[in-house]
Amino acid sequence: MGGRGSGAVPVCVAYQRLAVPAAGEVMSFNPNKRSPAVTRYVLPELRYDFGALEPHLSGKIIELHHGRHHRLYVDGANRAVEELIEARRRDDFQHIAAIQRALAFNVSGHVLHSIYWQNLSPEGGGRPTRALAQAIDRDFGSFDAFKKQLTRVAATIMGSGWAALVWEPVSCRLGTTQIKDHQGEVTQGSVPLLVLDAWEHAWYLQYGADKARYFEAIWNLWNWDDAAARLEGAQKLDPVLAMAVEAPGEEARLPH
Ligand code: MN
């Protein structure tokens, strides 16, 4: 695992921005001149035109999904942060549980959609290469087994949710997670590398009741370079939980 012992302390990007606020990215909520400036969540620009993912995903879907649905999560996340600041200012935590629920829902929705847009590319599809391909073979057996598993994870979601390829940093393995809404049933500590939006708003306009066709079509769009970059970043994460796992021993390697 890299990134340790180099002496350099990584600094969160949001904090770097905070030092020199960019216009529109940082808001000051300062009713009594004591609250610090707060980093705001923003809707990221897409790296491609709305119609660039056709025929697999229609331009109308991308336009609505990004401009309307994703924006609602951004606004909801910023509102929840403001409500927490206000609750502290008033010393009134009566609604803290509801605020935390809204924060988890909206921040998670914002994070997952931000990854989703970057996970997709007009030049996507095919198969991953190098380190990501090796990790998939090691942890799922084969790319085909991984594809089948992730597709089944998505197809068996009850209601709204996501299927995700994740890096689980405690066991240092790839895995899958079925995410309820945007935040439920998540494997703690896992880092999403590839996320499949299974909410109806992601496919219904184009695929109607046949969501299996969407789950197949999206494999023509995966940006494996983006997923590989996420794996590289995730593998630098040290959860400081070495005591919580045991490497496979001799026994595990012997045939039974
Ligand atoms: Mn969505």
Image (cartoon, grey):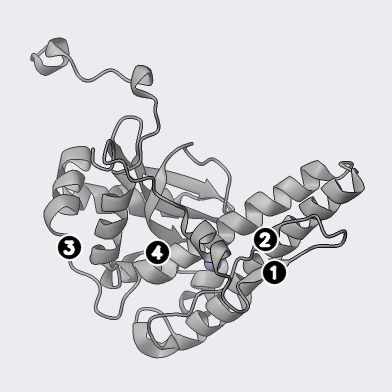
Query: How many angstroms separate mark 2 from mark 4 (CA)?
Result: 42 Å
Q: CA distance from mark 2 to mark 1?
A: 6 Å
Secondary element under disc 4, as helix, strand or loop, is helix
The front one of 141 and 111 is 111
Residue type pointed to by label 4: Ala
Specify the quadrant that holds the N terminus.
top left
Task: Kindly tell me whether mark 4's CB lies below 8 Å from ligand 1.
Answer: no
Circle 3 residues within 10 Å: few <14, some 14–19, many ≥20: some
The location of residue 40, given as percent across then percent down, is: 63, 66
Q: Earlier in the sequence, mark 4 or mark 3?
A: 3
Alpha-carbon span between mark 4 and mark 3: 20 Å
Chain-order first, disc 1 or disc 4: 1
Judge depth for marks 2 and 4 and give the one in front: 2
Distance (Cα) linking label 1 and label 4 = 42 Å
In the rendered image, the quadrant that contains the C terminus is top left
The image quarter in which residue 50 lies: bottom left
Looking at the picture, tell me which residue is in the foreground, 1 or 147.
1
The residue at the point 36 percent across, 17 percent down is 243
Lower sequence index among marks 2 and 1: 1
Q: Which mark is residue 127?
A: 3
**What residue would you read off at disc 4?**
212
The amino acid on which the numbered mark 1 sits, given as a three-letter code, is: Met
Q: Find numbered disc 1 in the image and state the secondary structure of the residue it sits on.
A: strand
According to the picture, the residue beneath numbered tag 2 turns out to be: 38
The residues bearing labels 3 and 1 have C-alpha atoms spaced at a distance of 42 Å
Q: Amino acid at mark 3?
A: Arg
| Circle number at residue 27 | 1
Residues marked 4 and 3 touching at CB (< 8 Å): no
Crowding near the residue tagged with mark 1, few <14, some 14–19, many ≥20 C-alpha atoms within 10 Å: some
